[in-house]
Image (cartoon, rainbow, N blue to C red):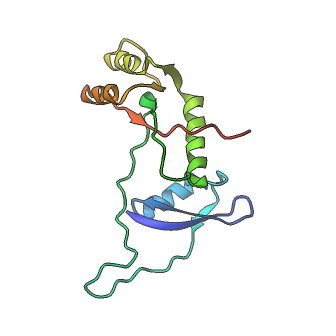
Amino acid sequence: MIHYDLRCMSTGEEHAFDGWYKDSAAFDALVKARLVECPLCGGTDVSRALMAPAIPKKGRPARNAVVPAPAAAPVPAEAAAVPTVPATAGPMPAQLRAMLQKLRTEVERSCDYVGADFAEEARRMHRGESDRRGIFGETSDAEAESLRDEGIEVARIPWVPPADG
Protein backbone atom coordinates (compact mmCIF):
# COMPACT_ATOMS: atom_id res chain seq x y z
CA MET A 1 0.00 0.00 0.00
CA ILE A 2 1.15 3.51 -0.73
CA HIS A 3 -0.09 6.71 0.89
CA TYR A 4 -0.37 9.92 -1.14
CA ASP A 5 -1.18 13.47 -0.20
CA LEU A 6 -3.50 14.64 -2.98
CA ARG A 7 -4.88 17.90 -4.24
CA CYS A 8 -7.94 18.73 -6.30
CA MET A 9 -7.99 21.66 -8.68
CA SER A 10 -11.48 21.03 -10.13
CA THR A 11 -13.10 24.15 -8.69
CA GLY A 12 -10.10 26.46 -8.90
CA GLU A 13 -9.56 26.07 -5.18
CA GLU A 14 -6.85 23.67 -4.06
CA HIS A 15 -8.56 21.08 -1.88
CA ALA A 16 -6.09 18.85 -0.01
CA PHE A 17 -6.84 15.27 1.03
CA ASP A 18 -5.07 11.93 1.15
CA GLY A 19 -5.58 8.36 0.03
CA TRP A 20 -4.13 4.86 0.13
CA TYR A 21 -3.49 2.91 -3.09
CA LYS A 22 -2.14 -0.52 -3.98
CA ASP A 23 0.84 1.06 -5.76
CA SER A 24 1.67 4.08 -7.92
CA ALA A 25 0.51 2.30 -11.10
CA ALA A 26 -2.91 1.66 -9.53
CA PHE A 27 -3.17 5.32 -8.52
CA ASP A 28 -2.17 6.48 -12.02
CA ALA A 29 -4.76 4.18 -13.64
CA LEU A 30 -7.53 5.43 -11.32
CA VAL A 31 -6.64 9.07 -11.98
CA LYS A 32 -6.54 8.46 -15.75
CA ALA A 33 -10.00 6.86 -15.56
CA ARG A 34 -11.16 9.85 -13.46
CA LEU A 35 -12.14 7.56 -10.57
CA VAL A 36 -10.28 9.45 -7.84
CA GLU A 37 -12.72 12.04 -6.51
CA CYS A 38 -12.22 14.95 -4.17
CA PRO A 39 -14.23 14.31 -0.99
CA LEU A 40 -15.01 18.04 -0.70
CA CYS A 41 -16.32 18.87 -4.17
CA GLY A 42 -16.49 15.55 -6.05
CA GLY A 43 -14.08 16.86 -8.69
CA THR A 44 -11.79 14.49 -10.55
CA ASP A 45 -8.96 16.90 -11.47
CA VAL A 46 -6.75 15.24 -8.85
CA SER A 47 -2.97 14.97 -8.64
CA ARG A 48 -0.33 14.02 -6.12
CA ALA A 49 0.97 16.79 -3.90
CA LEU A 50 4.59 17.06 -2.84
CA MET A 51 5.28 14.97 0.22
CA ALA A 52 8.19 15.04 2.63
CA PRO A 53 9.86 11.64 2.87
CA ALA A 54 9.76 9.80 6.19
CA ILE A 55 13.32 8.55 6.70
CA PRO A 56 13.84 6.71 9.98
CA LYS A 57 17.10 6.74 11.86
CA LYS A 58 18.98 3.47 11.68
CA GLY A 59 17.33 0.85 13.87
CA ARG A 60 14.23 2.94 14.65
CA PRO A 61 10.87 3.01 12.94
CA ALA A 62 9.84 6.31 11.36
CA ARG A 63 8.44 8.74 13.93
CA ASN A 64 5.16 9.03 12.10
CA ALA A 65 5.09 5.52 10.65
CA VAL A 66 1.52 4.40 10.12
CA VAL A 67 0.36 0.86 9.59
CA PRO A 68 -2.42 1.10 7.02
CA ALA A 69 -5.78 -0.37 7.85
CA PRO A 70 -6.88 -3.15 5.54
CA ALA A 71 -8.59 -1.80 2.46
CA ALA A 72 -12.34 -1.95 2.82
CA ALA A 73 -14.02 -4.19 0.33
CA PRO A 74 -16.50 -2.39 -1.92
CA VAL A 75 -20.05 -2.53 -0.65
CA PRO A 76 -21.79 -5.26 -2.64
CA ALA A 77 -24.85 -3.64 -4.18
CA GLU A 78 -26.96 -6.66 -3.27
CA ALA A 79 -26.11 -6.45 0.40
CA ALA A 80 -25.86 -2.85 1.52
CA ALA A 81 -27.56 -2.99 4.91
CA VAL A 82 -28.44 0.08 6.91
CA PRO A 83 -26.83 -0.25 10.34
CA THR A 84 -27.68 1.11 13.71
CA VAL A 85 -24.48 3.02 14.46
CA PRO A 86 -23.54 3.83 18.04
CA ALA A 87 -22.65 7.44 18.81
CA THR A 88 -19.03 8.33 18.17
CA ALA A 89 -16.71 9.94 20.69
CA GLY A 90 -16.67 13.24 18.83
CA PRO A 91 -17.96 15.06 15.78
CA MET A 92 -17.55 13.39 12.40
CA PRO A 93 -15.01 15.13 10.13
CA ALA A 94 -16.69 17.11 7.33
CA GLN A 95 -14.82 15.20 4.60
CA LEU A 96 -15.98 11.85 5.97
CA ARG A 97 -19.56 13.08 6.31
CA ALA A 98 -19.50 14.33 2.68
CA MET A 99 -18.20 10.97 1.43
CA LEU A 100 -20.83 9.04 3.40
CA GLN A 101 -23.57 11.36 2.12
CA LYS A 102 -22.40 10.73 -1.44
CA LEU A 103 -22.39 6.97 -0.77
CA ARG A 104 -25.91 7.16 0.68
CA THR A 105 -27.14 9.05 -2.39
CA GLU A 106 -25.64 6.42 -4.70
CA VAL A 107 -27.11 3.49 -2.71
CA GLU A 108 -30.56 5.12 -2.66
CA ARG A 109 -30.33 5.87 -6.40
CA SER A 110 -29.22 2.44 -7.54
CA CYS A 111 -30.61 -0.06 -5.00
CA ASP A 112 -34.06 -1.11 -3.82
CA TYR A 113 -35.06 -0.34 -0.23
CA VAL A 114 -36.52 -3.49 1.35
CA GLY A 115 -36.73 -2.23 4.93
CA ALA A 116 -36.99 -4.82 7.71
CA ASP A 117 -37.30 -7.58 5.06
CA PHE A 118 -33.59 -7.20 4.18
CA ALA A 119 -32.44 -10.60 5.49
CA GLU A 120 -35.30 -12.55 3.94
CA GLU A 121 -34.94 -10.81 0.56
CA ALA A 122 -31.16 -11.43 0.58
CA ARG A 123 -31.87 -15.12 1.20
CA ARG A 124 -34.47 -15.27 -1.60
CA MET A 125 -31.95 -13.74 -4.03
CA HIS A 126 -29.23 -16.12 -2.82
CA ARG A 127 -31.52 -19.14 -3.42
CA GLY A 128 -32.53 -17.84 -6.87
CA GLU A 129 -36.15 -17.25 -5.83
CA SER A 130 -35.90 -13.54 -6.53
CA ASP A 131 -34.05 -11.47 -9.13
CA ARG A 132 -30.54 -10.50 -8.08
CA ARG A 133 -30.31 -6.74 -7.60
CA GLY A 134 -28.90 -4.19 -5.22
CA ILE A 135 -30.90 -3.93 -2.00
CA PHE A 136 -30.60 -2.12 1.31
CA GLY A 137 -32.57 -2.16 4.51
CA GLU A 138 -32.38 -2.98 8.20
CA THR A 139 -31.34 -6.14 10.00
CA SER A 140 -29.95 -7.06 13.40
CA ASP A 141 -26.29 -7.83 14.04
CA ALA A 142 -27.18 -11.47 14.71
CA GLU A 143 -29.17 -11.75 11.46
CA ALA A 144 -26.34 -10.14 9.46
CA GLU A 145 -23.91 -12.66 10.96
CA SER A 146 -26.32 -15.48 10.07
CA LEU A 147 -26.41 -14.25 6.46
CA ARG A 148 -22.60 -14.28 6.36
CA ASP A 149 -22.58 -17.83 7.77
CA GLU A 150 -24.86 -18.85 4.87
CA GLY A 151 -22.36 -17.40 2.37
CA ILE A 152 -24.37 -14.25 1.64
CA GLU A 153 -22.21 -11.14 1.42
CA VAL A 154 -23.48 -8.38 3.70
CA ALA A 155 -21.91 -5.00 4.35
CA ARG A 156 -22.90 -2.29 6.78
CA ILE A 157 -22.29 1.37 6.13
CA PRO A 158 -22.79 4.33 8.46
CA TRP A 159 -26.10 5.92 7.43
CA VAL A 160 -25.70 9.67 7.84
CA PRO A 161 -28.46 12.21 7.17
CA PRO A 162 -28.64 13.13 3.46
CA ALA A 163 -26.80 16.18 2.19
CA ASP A 164 -28.84 19.39 2.00
CA GLY A 165 -30.01 20.39 -1.45
Q: Nearer the viewer, residue 162 or 54?
A: 162
Which residue sits at x=49%, y=20%? 115
Which residue sits at x=61%, y=53%? 94
Q: Nearer the viewer, residue 44 or 89?
A: 89
The quadrant in which the C terminus is found is: top right
Which residue sits at x=73%, y=59%? 11
Taking 125 as reference, is 38 above or below it?
Answer: below
**Visible in this render: residue 37?**
no
The quadrant in which the N terminus is found is: bottom left
Q: List x then y, in percent, for residue 81.
A: 44, 30
Taking 129 as reference, is 69 above or below it?
Answer: below
Q: List x then y, in percent, for residue 136.
A: 48, 27
Q: List x then y, in percent, for residue 110.
A: 56, 29
Q: List x then y, in percent, for residue 85.
A: 46, 38
Give the image quarter of residue 2.
Answer: bottom left
Taking 110 as reference, is 20 above or below it?
Answer: below
Give the image quarter of residue 100.
Answer: top right
Taking 102 as reference, is 120 above or below it?
Answer: above
Q: Is residue 91 left or right of residue 65?
A: right
Which residue sits at x=41%, y=80%? 54
- Residue sticking out furthest to the top: 129
Q: Nearer the viewer, residue 47 or 159?
A: 159
Give the image quarter of residue 60.
Answer: bottom left
**Visible in this render: residue 20?**
yes
